[in-house]
Amino acid sequence: MKLTVGAKIGAGYAVALLIIAVLGVASYRNASGYEEAVQQRAQGYQVIDNLAATLSTMQDAETGQRGYLIVGADRYLEPYNSASVNVYKVLQNLKDLVGSNAEQQRQLDQLHTLINAKFDELKETIALRQTKGFQAAMEVVQTDRGKKVMDDIRAVITDMNRQEKAVLDQRDVDVSIKSNAAIHTIVYGIPIAFVVLALLGFAIVRTITHELRDGISRLAASASEILATTTQLAASVVQTATAVSETTATVEEVKQTAQLTTEKARYVLDSAQKASNVSTVGRSAVDDTVQGMHRIQAQMESVADSIVRLSEQSQAIGEIIATVNGLAEQSNLLAVNAAIEATKAGEQGKGFGVVAQEIKSLADQSKQATAQVRTILGDIQKATSAAVLATEQGSKAVESGVKQTGDTGESIRLLADSITEAAQAATQIAASSQQQVAGMDQVVVAMESIKQASTQNVTGTRQAEEAAKSLHVLGLRLGDLIGSHRVAV
């Protein structure tokens, strides 16, 4: 398995750290052992001192008791009183010092019992001296009970001193051993570690240097290729950025065009809605016109019927006038005949002649009136014929107008439907144009983002080009450094 440069350096550091850790652990253990041995030795001396203090305190108590027994003055009890307090403090210190040593704890318990017994004896003699006098107290002293207890206290303290001194001798040996071990670790371990680390560093440096030479050669070649590629990429990115800028401008123009289209679509929508409203109104007007034309057609038909009836009545009047004219001619003829007959009759027929004359005059007037009526009736018939012809033409014109009005209404209806569809289409176009404007806004934002990204790409590519140049220079410098190092080796 081939290790990388970092792994080799890491392995070298790991070995160095391991050696340092081993030395540190060994030194720490030796130093800790040495410190512990020194502390234990100091603790042993404290135990011996406290044992001596215990014995000395008990002796002070015994001295105070004897002085009081002999003299009987309370001032001689001061050593006793101080000892009765201090001795128990010393015993507590001894218990704290011996700790978990079971044998010494047992001896301390024995010593504590003996001290209590000794103080009981001292209290008893002092009390007897105070109450019964010197002789009573001396009788207790002469039983040697106090002396025996005191001898036992000395024996226990002596035995504990002997054991503690033996322990101290052993601890002195341990201190010496721990001290020598720490010195040997420092004196021999550090040079050995230095030699091992120097050899290991030399081996790692040679290995890494050899690999770095090959890597730097490849790095120099790759840096040259990267530099060339980066230069081409920089030119391409600049062109891309230019194209993106042009595209952004084009999109902005398209956006403006879309906005204009939206405005036009809204204008068309408004116009279509207005035209739809106008066509609706026009359609209603055409419907009203068609209804009006139908009413005119009905009136024209009524007028035509009246004129026809008038023409028929005019013909009847003409026949009556002919009859009246015939009667007038006959009356005139009868009046002539009557005048002739009246002339023949002479005086008898004179009155009849006058009547005949009047009848003739009336007949002439009737004939004249009939001629005038015939003339008027002729004019009426001519006017009636013209009116009939005009009425027929008017009826045909009204019928044609009704048809044209119906066609116009249908055309306006179709136009209204077309305008409505156009209005709906204009609404859809306006909505689509609005969506197109919104889409163009999004496209503009996206193109701005692309433009910014292109600008960043240009900057990044230039930085990459500079980095490639720096990498190429660094490869050359590393090659020089590795070459110099090899010469030095």
Image (cartoon, grey):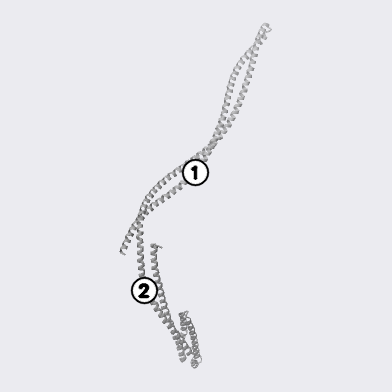
Name the one closer to the observer, 458 or 121: 458
- Compared with 423, 384 (above or below) is above
Residue at figure coordinates x 42%, y 80% from the top left: 171
Residue at figure coordinates x 62%, y 22% from the top left: 310
Going by the numbered disc 2, the residue's amino acid type is: Tyr
Residue 468 falls left or right of residue 269: left
- Compared with 205, 229 (above or below) is above
Q: Which residue is mark 1?
A: 432
Residue 11 falls left or right of residue 416: left
- How far, Cα to Cα, is label 2 from label 1? 92 Å
Q: Position of residue 476 (x, y in %)?
A: 33, 58
Q: Quadrant of the N terminus?
A: bottom left
Going by the numbered disc 1, the residue's amino acid type is: Ser
Q: Position of residue 438 (x, y in %)?
A: 47, 46
Name the one closer to the observer, 35 or 232: 232
Q: Position of residue 463 (x, y in %)?
A: 37, 54
- Compared with 201, 45 (above or below) is below
Residue 78 is drawn in which quadrant? bottom left
Inspect this view and state whether residue 419 appears. Answer: yes
2 or 1: tag closer to the N-terminus:
2
Q: Secondary structure at mark 1?
A: helix
- Compared with 108, 332 (above or below) is above
Q: Quadrant of the C terminus?
A: bottom left
Which mark, residue 294? none
Which mark, residue 188? 2
Residue at the farthest front position: 1
Residue 362 falls left or right of residue 173: right
Name the one closer to the observer, 135 or 42: 42
Q: Tell me the crowding category of disc 1: few under 14, some 14 to 19, or many 20 or more residues within 10 angstroms, Cα based.
A: some
Residue 228 falls left or right of residue 128: left
